[in-house]
Image (cartoon, rainbow, N blue to C red):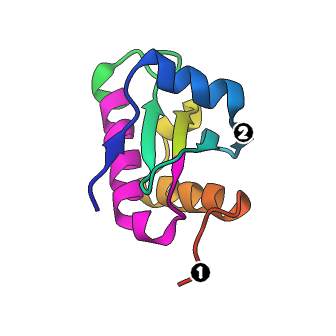
Amino acid sequence: MALISLKGEKDFNNVFQHGQKFGNRHFQFYYVKNRKDTNRLGIIVSKKVSKNAVVRNKIRRRIRESFRINGCCFKLGYDLIIIAKKRCVQASYQELNQSLKHLFYKTKMEVKS
């Protein structure tokens, strides 16, 4: 499944203004229904998480990979924004993957397989 990114300030603002939000220990999660048959993902890892760009990019890659692998288990037709928290720096890939699955389970966006 190809990963489609949210692009542009307009798309991000739409999700922040009209979307619902949920959070857990690793992520803050915003989502809103779009009128498409795919999910679009935006990932935010700020300098508050880590001043080191290598660390921020590593977190982004882990989130993107987890979403790509588990994408078939999520409902389609949403714009999603995942904001990483400071805890992500010490977390392993498995912890981030479980945390992402937890977000989709709690927001009822997970499809039973």
Left/right of residue 33 with respect to residue 38 in the rendered view: right
Residue 21 numbered tag: 2
Residue located at (52% from left, 57% from top): 95
Count of numbered circles on the image: 2
Residue furthest toward the bottom?
113
Residue pointed to by mark 1: 112
Q: Residue 57, relative to residue 48: is it above or below? A: below
Amino acid type, residue under disc 1 in the picture: Lys
Amino acid type, residue under disc 2 in the picture: Lys
Left/right of residue 6 with respect to residue 57 in the rendered view: right
Dot placed on the residue nearer the N-terminal end, 1 or 2: 2
Q: Secondary structure at mark 1?
A: loop
Q: Position of residue 89 (x, y in %)?
A: 47, 36
Residues at discs 1 and 2 in contact (Cβ within 8 Å): no
**Which segment did they paint magenta?**
56-78
Q: Position of residue 104 (x, y in %)?
A: 61, 59
Left/right of residue 13 with respect to residue 66 in the rendered view: right
Q: Is residue 88 magenta?
A: no
Q: Secondary structure at mark 2?
A: strand
Q: Position of residue 50 (x, y in %)?
A: 44, 21
Residue 69 numbered tag: none
